Image (cartoon, helix red, strand yellow):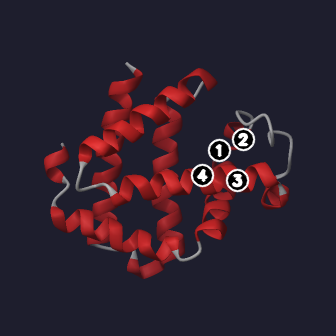
Amino acid sequence: MADSLTPELKTAVQDSWKLVRKDMKANAMDFFVTFFTRHPDYQKLFKDFKDKSTESLPEDQKFRGHAVRVFFAITSLVDNLDDLEVVVSILQKTVSDHSPRGVTAKHYENLFATILHFLETKLGAQFDGQWRQGWEVTAKVILSVIHGELQ
């Protein structure tokens, strides 16, 4: 499956993510508000902000910190698409850290579906063709690693 992630698609993912990185903090918070709006039950997995309204989350220091950390982790994945061993190592650590908290394969699948939706919303018409294909293939590769780790 990793063979389907061609150099052109890797570049497309990296180029599109550069636009997100320009305002990492705001985009990270916007993403998580979108994620929790689409999947309200997932917010309950976060003890520090499980009882807060979605609208108030950006005011919460722990929420902002978590959102930014996740986006930096995604940045690490994107930056290392040319070295899939590093990507696998990052994902193994992520799954190991989150599995005891009850995070399942379905959570990751919905996370990546929301990333695609978020990128489409944020990048508009630019998120078309090769950018979309790159992210779809990248998500499949990442999810295959995650599924392998969870078994």
Residue position for label 3? 65
The disc labelled 4 sits on which kind of residue?
Arg
| Marks 1 & 4, CB-CB < 8 Å contact | no
Q: Nearer the viewer, mark 2 or mark 3?
A: 3
Q: Of the numbered discs in the image, which one, if any, rests on residue 43? A: 2
The disc labelled 3 sits on which kind of residue?
Gly
Q: Residue at x 38, y 33 (%)?
A: 146
Q: Nearer the viewer, mark 3 or mark 1?
A: 3
Q: Nearer the viewer, residue 111 or 29?
A: 29
Q: Nearer the viewer, mark 1 or mark 4?
A: 4
Residue position for label 1? 39
The disc labelled 1 sits on which kind of residue?
His
Could you tell which of marks 3 and 1 lies nearer the N-terminus?
1
Q: Residue at x 42, y 69 (%)?
A: 17
| Marks 2 & 3, CB-CB < 8 Å contact | no
| Marks 2 & 1, CB-CB < 8 Å contact | yes
Left or right: 32 as drawn, with respect to 98: right
Q: Nearer the viewer, residue 47 or 122?
A: 47
The disc labelled 2 sits on which kind of residue?
Gln
Between the residue at mark 2 and the residue at mark 3, the CA separation in whole angstroms equals: 15 Å
| Marks 3 & 4, CB-CB < 8 Å contact | yes
Residue position for label 4? 69
